[in-house]
Image (cartoon, coloured by chain):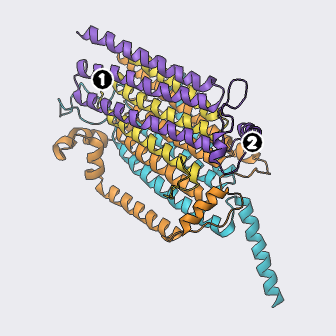
Chain colours: A purple, B orange, C yellow, D cyan
């Protein structure tokens, strides 16, 4: 029984570790802000789900500590509410600060930038792109 | 088995402390104060993980709630009343660097005969019988399973009273410095029209 | 198993911190702080199991909440330049 | 492993000295406050690290054996109590310092130390000239 629980929870934790480290590598390697956001937020939520399921199995069957299992379940619930909200807020703040999503060839994805509609400065796409370049060079936005 | 667990604990604490040093270098070099404040919030998060790794769970609780939560928000509030960027400095920092390196070298020389980390027989852990007394008598004398709580609230209760007085005094100081009235910002020419509209609607 | 988990979390934490230090824009830093908070939650939970006493999972529960509050406060500062403004106008989407 | 036995103390010293460097070399007042808090946390790690015992757990009694038995080692609870107080007091002092900085910004329009000093000297010169005219 214990061996079975160990194997199942080990598989869950392994999947979670792959998600998490993959997301962290994506956060380093991706070219622009929105792709990084995608890499980080999706894998965070998925990774914490798998790891916590593995830990819950361990807490219930190996450590015989149901209170810890309940707390870990609460962690899952909170992360599932807060992580997507936080990434949505980051994405919205970045869009309102005129950081424009880009294709691989450097062209803007949206023809007339959404950000410049939100922003009161009505920028043409070329101006917006230039601003994005200066933004990437500068530390501050 | 026991040796392995101890080695792993040492390893985790060492990695996390190195992470903190790198974060501190980032705080030194960043010119943007907002980025520095964000990094200091991250610093508090990692530091609470260190406290968990050092078996100080109550300290980790306090550091998470007070260090990572409240102090970041206080710093952000102060930045919203002042400026966001740090001016480049003209003079050289060489004398400061020399003083800091000398002090650090002296302190490292002082640590050479310290007991190593995790030593249960070090003077701090064995010589004063106070900690042993707390650990052995606390369940009978106070009935609280958490020793830190029983020391904080029962054995050293006047200490905690003094701490509350300090926090109260600090709150009075902040209120008398800043006042409770609504502060009005001066008109900033760099604002976008949208932000200006929002400010006007707030003021009315 | 827990050792592998702790080491994986530490590796991911170091990678995320690299992005927080390099990050060209401030939003990258904010994103990596949020992500590092999640890593610290997992690290504390796993550390309790590693040392054989999983009673202290409450701390990671607290962390998940504190991390969210910090992110929202910083982002509110970005958008409004102020923490206290409750004005939310109709041109916000 | 002998070499790394003191690694924690050295890391703490590097952290403290980094905070000290920020406090004396950076002229921005908010940066100085950040340096102060880094210095403080360095001291916290030093204290809490002193109380750590290898193979021990947090000083909260495990329910099965309420009395202290030889089987379970607990870490030293005394540094934890001291640091618990110090963290709260540290945040209180930080709040007072930041309030002072906000007041300074309202008076001088700057949070750079050298600019504030220049403004002060200019005001003193102006005061002196005003008195000389009388």
| Residue labelled with disc 2 | A124
Judge from the rendering whether residue A62 lies leftward or rightward of residue C93; answer left or right: left
Rendered location of residue B63, percent (x, y): 43, 44
At horizontal 33% and vertical 40% (from top left) the residue drawn is D77
Judge from the rendering whether residue C90 lies leftward or rightward of residue A114; answer left or right: left
> Of B121 and C5, which appears nearest the observer?
C5
Q: Is residue B25 above or below residue D117?
A: above
> Of B52 and B39, which appears nearest the observer?
B39
At horizontal 82% and vertical 82% (from top left) the residue drawn is D129
Res B158 → quadrant? bottom left
Rendered location of residue A117, percent (x, y): 64, 45
Judge from the rendering whether residue B171 lies leftward or rightward of residue B183; answer left or right: left
Quadrant of the frame with the N terminus of chain A: top left
Q: Is residue D118 above or below residue A44?
A: below
* Residue placed furthest toward the bottom: D134
Chain containing mark 2:
A
Res D97 → quadrant? bottom right
| Residue labelled with disc 1 | A56
Res C30 → quadrant? top right
At horizontal 47% and vertical 68% (from top left) the residue drawn is B175
Element at label 2? loop
> Of B63 and A70, which appears nearest the observer?
A70
């Amino acid at each position: 029984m214990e061996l079975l629980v160990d194997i199942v929870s080990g598989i869950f934790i392994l999947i979670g570790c792959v998600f998490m480290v993959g997301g962290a590598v994506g956060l380093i390697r991706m070219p622009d802000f929105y792709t990084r956001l995608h890499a980080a937020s999706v894998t965070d939520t998925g990774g914490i789900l798998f790891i916590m399921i593995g830990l819950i199995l361990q807490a219930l069957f190996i450590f015989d500590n149901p209170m810890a299992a309940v707390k870990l379940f609460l962690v899952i619930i909170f992360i599932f509410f807060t992580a997507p909200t936080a990434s949505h807020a980051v994405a919205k703040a970045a869009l309102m600060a005129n950081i424009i999503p880009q294709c691989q060839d450097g062209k803007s994805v949206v023809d007339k930038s959404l950000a410049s509609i939100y922003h009161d400065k009505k920028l043409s796409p070329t101006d917006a792109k230039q601003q994005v370049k200066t933004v990437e060079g500068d530390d501050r936005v | 088995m026991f040796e392995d667990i101890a080695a792993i604990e040492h390893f985790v604490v060492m990695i996390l402390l190195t992470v903190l040093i790198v974060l501190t270098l980032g705080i030194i070099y960043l010119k943007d104060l907002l980025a520095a404040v964000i990094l200091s919030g991250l610093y508090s998060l990692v530091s609470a993980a260190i406290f968990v790794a050092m078996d100080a769970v109550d300290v980790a609780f306090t550091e998470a709630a007070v260090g990572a939560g409240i102090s970041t928000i206080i710093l952000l509030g102060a930045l919203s009343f002042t400026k966001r960027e740090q001016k480049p400095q003209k003079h050289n920092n060489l004398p400061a660097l020399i003083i800091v390196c000398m002090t650090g070298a002296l302190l490292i020389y002082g640590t050479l005969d310290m007991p190593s980390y995790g030593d249960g027989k070090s003077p701090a852990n064995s010589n004063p019988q106070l900690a042993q007394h707390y650990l052995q008598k606390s369940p009978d004398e106070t009935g609280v399973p958490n020793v830190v709580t029983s020391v904080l609230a029962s054995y050293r209760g006047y200490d905690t009273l003094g701490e509350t007085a300090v926090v109260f005094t600090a709150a009075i100081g902040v209120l008398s410095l800043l006042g409770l009235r609504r502060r009005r910002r001066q008109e900033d020419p760099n604002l976008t029209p949208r932000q200006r509209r929002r400010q006007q609607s707030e003021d009315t | 198993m827990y050792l592998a988990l702790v080491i994986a979390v530490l590796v991911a934490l170091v990678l995320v911190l690299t992005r927080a230090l390099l990050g060209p824009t401030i939003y990258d830093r904010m994103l990596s702080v949020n992500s590092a908070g999640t890593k610290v939650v997992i690290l504390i939970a796993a550390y309790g199991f590693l040392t054989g006493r999983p009673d202290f999972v409450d701390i990671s529960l607290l962390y998940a909440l504190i991390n969210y509050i910090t992110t929202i406060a910083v982002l509110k500062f970005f958008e409004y330049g102020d923490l206290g403004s409750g004005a939310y106008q109709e041109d916000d989407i | 492993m002998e070499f790394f036995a003191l690694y924690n103390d050295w890391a703490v010293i590097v952290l403290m000295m980094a905070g000290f460097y920020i406090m004396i070399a950076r002229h921005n007042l908010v940066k100085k406050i950040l340096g102060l808090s880094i210095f403080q946390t360095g001291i916290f790690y030093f204290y809490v690290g002193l109380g750590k015992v290898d193979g021990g757990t947090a000083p909260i009694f495990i329910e099965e054996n309420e009395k202290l038995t030889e089987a379970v080692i607990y870490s030293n609870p005394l540094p934890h109590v001291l640091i618990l107080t110090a963290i709260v007091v540290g945040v209180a002092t930080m709040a007072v310092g930041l309030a002072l900085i906000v007041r300074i910004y309202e008076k001088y329009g700057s949070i750079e130390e050298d600019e504030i000093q220049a403004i002060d000297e200019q005001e003193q010169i102006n005061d002196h000239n005003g008195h000389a005219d009388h």
